[in-house]
Amino acid sequence: PPSCLPAEDISTNSNGPKQEILLDDDQEDLFAEATEEVSLDSPEREPILSDGPSPAITPVTPTVIITPRAEASMFDRSLDEDEDTEENGDTFDMQITVSDPEKVGGFGCTSLNLFSRNEFSVKRRFSDFLGLHSKLASKYMHIGYIVPPAPEKSIVGMTKVKVGKEDLSSAEFVEKRRSALQRYLTRTVTHPALLKDPDVIQFLENTELPRAVSTQALSGAGILRMVNKAAEAVNKMTIKMNESDAWFEEKQQQFENLDIQLRKLHASVESLVCHRKELSVNTASFAKSAAMLGNSEDHTALSRALSQLAEVEEKIDQLHQEQAYADFYLFSELLGDYVRLIAAVKGVFDQRMKTWSKWQDAQLLLQRKREAETKLQYANKPDKLQQAKDEIKEWETKVQQGERDFEQISKNIRQEVGRFEKQRVKDFKVVIIKYLESLVHTQQQLIKYWEAFLPEAKAIA
Amino acid sequence: MQEGLDDGPDFLSEEDRGPRAVNVDLQTDATLQVDISDALSERDKVKFTVHTKSTLPNFKQNEFSVVRQHEEFIWLHDSFVENEDYAGFIIPPAPPRPDFDASREKLQKLGEGEGSMTKEEFTKMKQELEAEYLAIFKKTVAMHEVFLCRVAAHPVLRKDLNFHVFLEYNQDLSVRGKNKKEKLEDFFKNVVKSADGVIVAGVKDVDDFFEHEKTFLLEYHNRVKDASIKSDRMIRSHKSAADDINRIASTLYTLGTQDSTDKIEARVAADEDLKLADLLKYYLRESQAAKDLLYRRGRALVDYENANKALDKARAKNKDVLQAETTQQVCCQKFEKISESAKQELIDFKTRRVAAFRKNLVELAELELKHAKVLGNLQLLQSCLAVLKGDT
């Protein structure tokens, strides 16, 4: 007997905006790990503690937090260099800024339409962002759109590298989250279809959002998803798709490899951030020690040189700190984003497989119905015969729909992957250049410091 | 005997075989030159080939070599310490025991994990670990060589009979390492010595020079110790970060341009290790040796003063006066002998220290500059490449 998917998957209300709050397993949050805390009552900080609706728009001046090396406007889309012809031709260029929650009691979210110069500033909670993603995922993933994943909920980094004795201070944590939310929103509005989505528009413009009930129900739905994920894994093994299109097979392999490389890279960068912080601490400690040694040295010139050495090391410590910052915000976070994005990409490939499977199952069922009808023709049961004929019609439609869906999702995915790859190249290029520039800067500073020290060392007589 | 200078990138190369008296500033002397011309690392011991060139009549030949192990160096050092005649000298500190345990463990772990990594990764890691092993090996050779050079440079110690036997006798010296009982005895001796040292140090010295040196050395020694510990920690972190950069570079630049960039951070750390950490470690040991000298002198002073008191008592009672006089004379001579040479030794110590710090700090700065310039240029180049390629 053909493996039949659970009844809900064959529902036809997969197109169009979903109004239901509870998510069914078809539109799963692909990056949610089973081990992740899903409830809103988690011990992590929530910017808003009050329960009521958000107050009126406060004139939030886009408080862009400029980090020493990584400007927050890195993902600025002011000049879209994309020559790709979008479906409708009118691309809205939006600049998104998410500001520090401390000051206004919620993440200030400012969207500036660079075309019309319309600007909206609203307050949003972290759960609101998650809610937005849930809605978008449920609407678009099954037709093959790569929906940008929302930031991680858990405090521990994705690669679970030990952050060292000083865990993320609250200020660091908030900044990390703020920056992640800004990147998330920016990616979302860069997607031509998502930009026009009513939920997105509502998110960016409405003063009040209905409290994201779905995220509260995520606890229950989260568990449901976990269970279904397991079932799906089993299902996947039995779905052997006849891939007529080599492009898809090739791409899937590519993304597999990319996934592995990015994860490896991400782990290395997180380790580097950790070690650099350690190095900074140890350099500062050595600097103090060298100063003390210089104090007790009774040869004047040597004493002075040792004190100078201490100063140089202190300055180097500063450099290490700045470098660690750059490592983190430029590199590590981007890599984390891309690891999650690739999970979303793999997700749409899976959706395509499911769509194909649905179509195949419809075909099989149609055949069975036809066989049944043939049998009934000799059974002289006119009512049943008519019913059978009706069912055949029904299933013929479903088969046609299945084929259309499959072709549509295949087409969408091709487009999406093209867009994704272009974006990826752009993002990484920008980051690598910035990173290398910061490294060059560091080396230039080092040269300055050591060149100043050298004559002091030579002066020891 | 020349002062070997290590020029950055060649540090890890096999060809570099010159003597490596980096931590001391020694005058070349044709009458006696000692160096370690070769070394072999076996299972758990290192065999050093000690090579001597001398015009002194004491030796049968003008040039000869013998093979020595670490224990024999320790035997020689201890024989100096125990020799009363040398009480007035700063005894050159013994070289530390060769320690390859950590490196060997890493190599072993790598061998065990061979199956879980690609051939490329394995070869790369193996190369790195081998380089690390080689670096440690070179360092231990340098430490042993420095010890011998210091002895050879000392006007009195170079004439020591044991030293000549050490250099010339081409059989095994049969100095077994200390057994448990002897090690325990040593332990107790040290405890007694430190306690005594505290007492002796408490006695105020009549001589200003020595009083000043006492205070100075105590503080200096402690601070050098602290600086040595902190510099080790700093360099360890630096090496960890360099390892990470290594890994990142190889994942990113798969085109093989990585060779130059990723090794540089590791070299910076290695150079810091050599010029800074080793310097501090060496002076930690030397300052301890200087403290030991002061202790011996202090001890002799106390003995002398006690002998004086005993003599007065004996004269007062008119009993055993001759004996007391002899004892007092012996103590006096001992004290004066030590004081005489100690002053010069301590002055020399300062000169050596200042010179060594100068040399190493200058070289450290020059190496840091060199690396920063290379790294800066390379990165710029890489960034241009990245832009041109338009690729990750």
Image (spheres, rainbow, N blue to C red):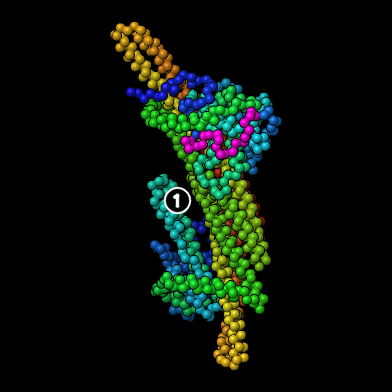
Q: Reply yes or no: does residue A36 show up in magenta.
A: yes
Residue A17 in picture, x, y percent from top left:
54, 21
Q: Nearer the viewer, residue A433 or B86?
A: B86
| Amino acid type at mark 1 | Met
Q: Residue at x 45, y 20 (%)?
A: A11
Residue A250 appearing in the image: no
Secondary structure at numbered mark 1: helix
- Which residue: 50% across, 68% down? B95
Q: Which residues are magenta?
A: A33-54
Q: Report x, y in % for residue B35.
A: 49, 69
Relative height, residue B72 to residue A343 (above, below)? below
Residue at point 70%, 30% (across, down):
A59
Q: Picture quarter containing residue B179?
A: bottom left
Q: Which residue is mark 1?
A: B125
Would residue B71 appear left or right of A210 to someone viewing this image?
Answer: left
Image quadrant where residue A288 sits: bottom right
Residue A133 drawn above or below residue A393: below
Around disc 1, counting alpha carbons within 10 Å, would you say few (fewer than 14), some (14 to 19), or many (20 or more)?
some
Q: Is residue A272 above or below residue A8?
A: below
In the image shown, does A409 or A203 lie closer to the viewer?
A203
x and y, in percent, of residue A26 in the image: 46, 26
Residue A196 highlighted magenta (yes or no): no
Determine whether A156 is above or below A237 in the image.
below
Is residue A378 something one can see in this rendering?
yes
Depth check: give the residue in front, A270 or B10: A270
| Of residues A290 and A430, the one drawn nearer to the viewer in this rendering | A290
- The residue that appears at 51% across and 36% down in the rendered structure is A37
Q: Looking at the picture, how far across and down is residue A132, in whole percent?
A: 56, 28
Q: Main secondary structure of the magenta part?
A: loop
Q: Callout 1: residue from which chain?
A: B
Query: Quick check: B184 left or right of B284?
Result: left
